[in-house]
Image: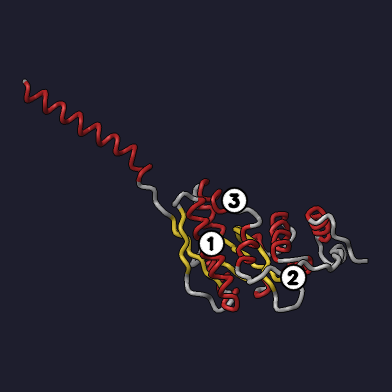
Amino acid sequence: MATLKLRTLLIQAVAGAALYAGFAAPVSAQSTETLRIGQAMQSASALSTAVVTSLGERIRERSGGSLDLKSSAPYANAAQALKALERGDLDLAFIRLADVPSQFPHHWVVAELGRLGDPGVSGMLHQKLVDRGVLCGYGLYQVIAAGTAPSDRQGSAEGVAVLMNQDRFDALNEAQQDALSGFDTGWLPGRILSTMTAAPAAQTVAWQSMVSRHPAGRMIDRVIGESLPGLSKAE
């Protein structure tokens, strides 16, 4: 009788452990999704390295380790990186918008923003315009971050963006999506500024109204006016 009772207790213990393991496994064995990022920024390698490295660290931190970032070999140009993104060969692409003008016809607006001040100012405005949906080209992708990098032209700057394959983004769970879409607007401009030996002095160029120059010119003027209330418009 004692042997039978002992056997019963052992069976109950094993069954209880198996049941606990069944509930505990999903919590302890959290899988990590690896996101592949490609870039076409060979002319600004320091910027690329700083942004991509920082992005990987932030993604891991914000997602609690459920997302990781892996860099692929650089692409010859932004068009190739975008095609790889659309095919699903990449999950994210870091590009300069002016390199693909047919895809981002309003890239020149971002260059205009560069006349207003340092990359932190123009980058903040760039992100706000992306969020408002007034710049063409971003609608095919999930925009992780947008910013502005110094241009070769004096007093100007060009737009850069971290874009994500929309299907890949939609396939992630809600917490992972929140980790990617929750970047504050100052992150990318801040990373760009950190790659420069010294932040450029703010420009004093008066803003020229975009009403007659862009289909969403009135909205652009409003965003700039709300963000930089002390800035005057050029006559």
Q: Amino acid at mark 3?
A: Gly
- Which residue is the site of mark 2? 111
Cα distance between the residues tagged 2 and 3: 25 Å
Residue 178 in view of the camera: yes
Is the residue 91 above or below the residue 23 in the image?
Answer: below
Q: Earlier in the sequence, mark 1 or mark 3?
A: 1
Is the residue 210 above or below the residue 65 in the image?
Answer: below
- x, y percent for residue 57: 50, 58
Q: How many neighbours does mark 2 have within 10 angstroms: few (below 14), some (14-19), or many (20 or more)?
A: many
Question: For residue 148, which quarter of the picture?
Answer: bottom right
Question: For residue 3, which quarter of the picture?
Answer: top left
Residue 219 in view of the camera: no
Q: Residue at x 56, y 61 (%)?
A: 164
- x, y percent for residue 159: 68, 68
Q: Earlier in the sequence, mark 2 or mark 3?
A: 2
Q: How many neighbours does mark 3 have within 10 angstroms: few (below 14), some (14-19), or many (20 or more)?
A: few
- x, y percent for residue 102: 69, 73
Q: Residue at x 72, y 66 (%)?
A: 118
Q: Quadrant of the C terminus?
A: bottom right
Q: Quadrant of the N terminus?
A: top left
**Residue 208 left/right relative to 52:** right
Q: Earlier in the sequence, mark 1 or mark 2?
A: 1
- Which residue is the site of mark 3? 182
- Which residue is the site of mark 1? 54
**Residue 62 left/right relative to 148:** left
Q: Secondary structure at mark 1?
A: helix
